[in-house]
Image (spheres, rainbow, N blue to C red):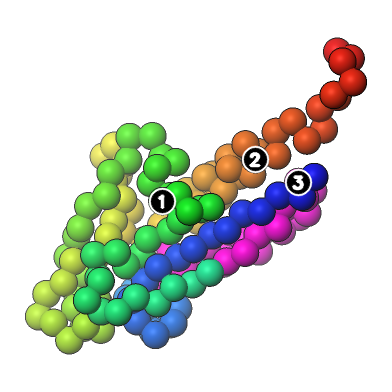
């Protein structure tokens, strides 16, 4: 059975190299993880679509947000919370003196740029969940 995983990344700026520093690092991490996991996706028969959404500067508070099949990344991370932290890079892009950008807190850790290992862990977990039972015997055998 074929499955789909849609990953959407929202950020301000014009593109991956025209966004704030930490958003750019998140975008790079997403692309690296997707490339690294290609064999895994093929094995699991999962088609991945990556969407990059550029937000207007007025929506800085939503910048650096990642959705997986329509669900915010932080919803997959136990004990996580979203915070806004100062981002001089976003301020520069938006032509403001100061600006705050999204970050995710998990316990005592704060992630202003989402690291590849965190993204990889969540993506593998989602794929395992959506593909569970594909190889199960449905003829009543043990």
Please state the horizontal and vertical placement of residue 86, each as a whole percent of the image: 17, 65
Q: CA distance from mark 1 to mark 3?
A: 23 Å
Please state the horizontal and vertical placement of residue 12, each as a whole percent of the image: 33, 76
Mark number displayed over residue 130: 2
Q: Residue at point 29% right, 56% down?
A: 103
Name the N-terminal-most of marks 3 and 2. 3
For the N terminus, the image quarter is top right
**What span is colored magenta in the figure?**
23-50
Q: Do residues under tags 3 and 2 come within 8 Å of each other at their CB atoms?
A: no
Q: Residues within 10 Å of mark 2 (few under 14, many from 20)?
A: some
Q: Nearer the viewer, residue 38 or 2?
A: 2
* Residue matched to label 1: 72
- Judged from the image, the secondary structure of the residue bearing numbered disc 2 is helix
* Residue matched to label 3: 44
Please state the horizontal and vertical placement of residue 30, each as a whole percent of the image: 52, 63
Q: Main secondary structure of the magenta part?
A: helix
- Judged from the image, the secondary structure of the residue bearing numbered disc 3 is helix
Residue 5 in the magenta stretch? The answer is no
Q: Do residues under tags 1 and 3 come within 8 Å of each other at their CB atoms?
A: no
Q: Residue at point 44% right, 73% down?
A: 53
């Amino acid at each position: 059975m074929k499955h789909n995983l849609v990953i959407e990344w929202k950020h301000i700026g014009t593109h991956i190299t025209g966004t704030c520093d930490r958003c750019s690092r998140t975008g790079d991490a997403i692309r690296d993880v997707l490339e690294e996991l290609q064999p895994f996706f093929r094995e699991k028969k999962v088609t991945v679509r990556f969407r990059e959404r550029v937000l207007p500067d007025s929506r800085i508070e939503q910048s650096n947000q990642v959705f997986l099949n329509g669900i915010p990344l932080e919803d997959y991370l136990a004990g996580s919370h979203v915070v806004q932290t100062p981002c001089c890079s976003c301020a520069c892009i938006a032509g403001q003196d100061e600006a705050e950008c999204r970050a995710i807190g998990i316990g005592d850790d704060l992630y202003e740029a989402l690291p590849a290992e965190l993204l990889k862990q969540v993506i593998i977990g989602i794929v395992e969940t959506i593909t569970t039972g594909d190889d199960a015997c449905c003829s009543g055998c043990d």
